[in-house]
């Protein structure tokens, strides 16, 4: 295990109870605000990057290469952390859109942005950059998608320890911790934290794009890099029934759900990660899958910048119209 990390994120993040939803569902539903970790660095990625960047500094690397979707929260958090040193190279895959959301922030933060086709390999593109920098006498470091490797996942082992302390403060024991799964590092850290603390809390992941099987293997791979002694991975629980139309895409029903949560609880879920996962959680509670649980924690992992122009335009037709007449 690594013991040193940068101290950049706003930690501990608060845990709040969602009163209306708790009443409606007959459970105590709590939300941990990892969307409050910061502003430019907001969301779950900075917890992982605190370890990754410490590792980079400790080992003398001078250039950071990482990757993600055009809308990547991870790329944006990396760009923010690397801004002062002007060393971040982002390989972003997808259709080039206007400078909006995270892409806009990446550019503002001075990241060097490379866009590749939706069908191209991110790893090949990163390798190419790596070799170029090596040829220039630099010492580049590749951060994988989502910083989801044995280093980054420490951020969520740490988050698990934070939750244990908060349980004492709140005088509650969470029966489950629920989270979106996009590259697996967040889930892996929580699951491993739960394991080594011998806790009974179930860690339940909601896949946002690939199958539960694929993600389970990814999570196991990350944990194996961290600790070879784990015997059983049976309790890894990932639900892939709420992927819907796929990565970053939302149905009208999903959008309506996000509106409802925003207007009932004052919390904005994002259409790529937390929205899918939270909708999954609510559906599963309604269908009885959580009947033996009373205290349920959801981690809001951030992602507010994920509302693209396309989604915003669709939402506009579903929201209260703005009253343009002047108040008399
Ligand atoms: C990346 C991300 C996730 C998923 O976390 P992983 O560690 O990649 O599985 C969840 N929510 C948001 C907002 C994210 O940006």
Image (tube, rainbow, N blue to C red):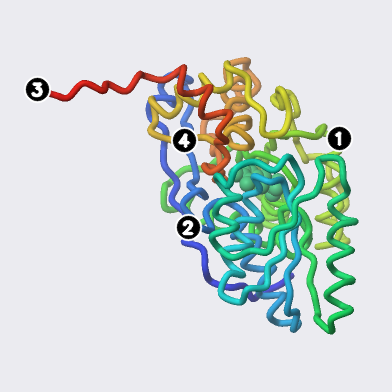
- Which residue in the protein does label 4 denote? 268
Cβ–Cβ under 8 Å for marks 3 and 1 = no
| Furthest residue in direction left, as rendered | 328
Estimate the x, y position of residue 12 in percent, counting from the top left.
47, 59
Residue occupying the point 42% across, 33% down: 18
Of callouts 3 and 1, the N-terminal one: 1
Of residues 284 and 63, which is closer to you in this image? Answer: 63
Residue 114 sits in quarter: bottom right
Instruction: Say whether residue 239 is visible.
Output: yes
Between marks 2 and 1 in the image, the one whose residue lies nearer the viewer: 2
Cβ–Cβ under 8 Å for marks 2 and 3 = no
Q: Is residue 261 above or below residue 162?
A: above
Mark pair 2, 3: CA separation: 40 Å
Mark pair 1, 4: CA separation: 29 Å
Element under disc 4: loop
**Residue 213 - label:** 1
Between marks 2 and 3 in the image, the one whose residue lies nearer the viewer: 3
- Which residue in the protein does label 2 denote? 38
Residue 87 sits in quarter: bottom right
Of callouts 4 and 2, the N-terminal one: 2
């Amino acid at each position: 295990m690594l013991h040193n990390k940068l101290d950049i994120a706003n930690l501990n993040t608060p845990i709040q109870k969602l009163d209306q939803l708790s009443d409606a569902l007959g459970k105590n539903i709590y939300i941990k605000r990892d969307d409050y970790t910061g502003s430019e660095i907001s969301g779950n990625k900075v917890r992982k990057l605190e370890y990754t960047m410490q590792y980079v500094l400790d080992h003398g690397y001078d250039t950071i290469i990482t990757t993600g979707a055009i809308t990547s929260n991870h790329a944006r958090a990396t760009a923010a952390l690397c801004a002062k040193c002007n060393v971040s190279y982002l390989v972003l895959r997808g259709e080039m859109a206007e400078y909006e959301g995270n892409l806009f922030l990446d550019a503002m933060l001075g990241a060097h942005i490379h866009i590749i086709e939706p069908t191209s390999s991110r790893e090949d593109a990163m390798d190419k950059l790596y070799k170029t920098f090596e040829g220039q006498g630099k010492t580049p470091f590749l951060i994988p998608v989502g910083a989801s490797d044995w280093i980054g996942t420490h951020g969520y082992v740490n988050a698990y320890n934070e939750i244990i302390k908060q349980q004492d403060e709140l005088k509650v024991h969470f029966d489950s911790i629920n989270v979106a799964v996009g590259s697996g590092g967040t889930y892996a850290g929580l699951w491993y934290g739960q394991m080594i603390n011998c806790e009974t809390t179930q860690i339940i992941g909601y896949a946002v794009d690939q199958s539960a099987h694929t993600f389970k293997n990814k999570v196991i791979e990350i944990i194996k890099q961290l600790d070879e002694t784990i015997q059983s991975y049976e309790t890894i629980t990932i639900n892939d029934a709420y992927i819907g139309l796929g990565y970053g895409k939302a149905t009208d029903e999903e959008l309506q759900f996000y509106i409802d949560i925003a207007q009932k609880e004052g919390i904005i879920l994002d259409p790529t990660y937390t929205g899918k996962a939270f909708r999954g959680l609510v559906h599963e509670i309604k269908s009885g899958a959580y009947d033996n649980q009373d205290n349920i924690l959801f981690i809001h992992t951030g992602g507010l910048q994920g509302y693209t122009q396309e989604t915003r335009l669709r939402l506009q037709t579903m929201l209260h119209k703005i009253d343009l007449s002047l108040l008399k």
